[in-house]
Amino acid sequence: MTARLHCFGESGNAYKAALTMTLAGYDWRPVFVDFFGGATRSPEFRALNIMGEVPVLEDAGRVITQSGAIMYHVVQETGRFGGAPGEAAEVLRWVLWDNHKMSSQAGPLRFMMNFLAADKRPEAVIAWLAGRLRGAFAALDAHLAGRDWIVGDGVTIADLSCCGYLYYPEPFGFARAEWPNIDRWLGNIAALPGWMHPYDLMPGNPAERAGAEDPT
């Protein structure tokens, strides 16, 4: 039975799950969640995920939420992207680091800088998050010096978690040219067979929403 991933294109966390399933050859399809229309606050969605967040995976009668949990589910089901024997703890370390130190800064910062009205953007918060995020970029770039992948000799969910927000075109304090090791690593991921940009992999993007709001 085809798994269903509740997601939308602007969500970097949903992208982590979608990209992992796609590269692993998992049988799945996207279910669009109209986040900007308030869908995650609806009783129907909260019945699916009380946390009110995407991604949500429905797979063979199970409901799995949080990107990391979904990625680990795919590893368990397919045997792919979990790392070589002895690398599991290091893969987990970087998934947890991303969730705490990088995606947790990048997601809110990108949202505030691009999806809030200009007069509602909290400039002090934006500056604080940007500083925290630069520290995360510096740590990742230093770790990737002389490495093709975050852990070991092949792509793992550590890579697919940490890259979740870094292909988006909207400005949020990340310029690939500033971080040559991250830039090279992102190129490695994008060269994997089946890789897709988040706006091509999942439904929903700013251009579509702008078109829907255009009265002409």
Image: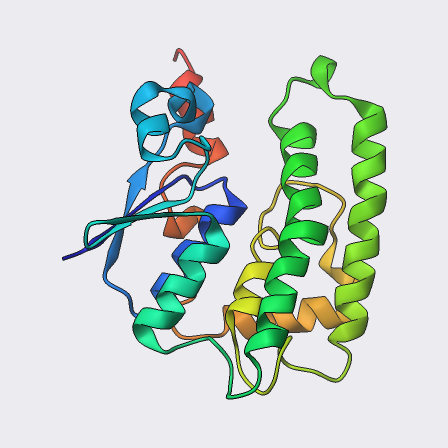
Image location of residue 133, percent across then percent down: 78, 48
**Which residue is located at x 50 percent, y 39 percent?**
10
Residue 21 shown left or right of residue 168 in the figure? left
Who's the residue at 73% across and 75% down the image?
144
> Quick check: 20 above or below 145?
above
Which residue: 31% across, 28% down?
A: 47
Q: Nearer the viewer, residue 193 or 93?
A: 93
Measured along the vertical axis of the image, is residue 142 above or below residue 15? below
- What kind of colouring is applied to the model shown? rainbow
Q: In the rendering, at what x and y percent does residue 132 appear? A: 82, 46
Relative horizontal placement of residue 141, taking residue 27 as reference (left or right): right
Q: Is residue 34 visible?
A: yes
Check the image and name the residue furthest to the left.
1
**Is residue 196 shown above or below 55?**
below
Quadrant of image for the N terminus: bottom left
Quadrant where the image shows the C terminus = top left
Find residue 164 and report its horizontal and vertical position in percent: 56, 54
Q: Quick one: 144 or 63, which is closer to the camera?
A: 63
**Rendered position, 154 above or below 213:** below
Residue 185 vs residue 80: left or right?
Answer: right
Q: Tell me which residue sits at (64%, 72%) in the image.
A: 185
Instruction: Indicate the position of residue 103 as horizontal and vertical percent values.
Output: 64, 49
Report the number of numbered marks: 0
Residue 24 visible in rendering: no
Horizontal side, residue 87 vs residue 43: left or right: right
Dividing the picture into quadrants, the one containing residue 203 is top left
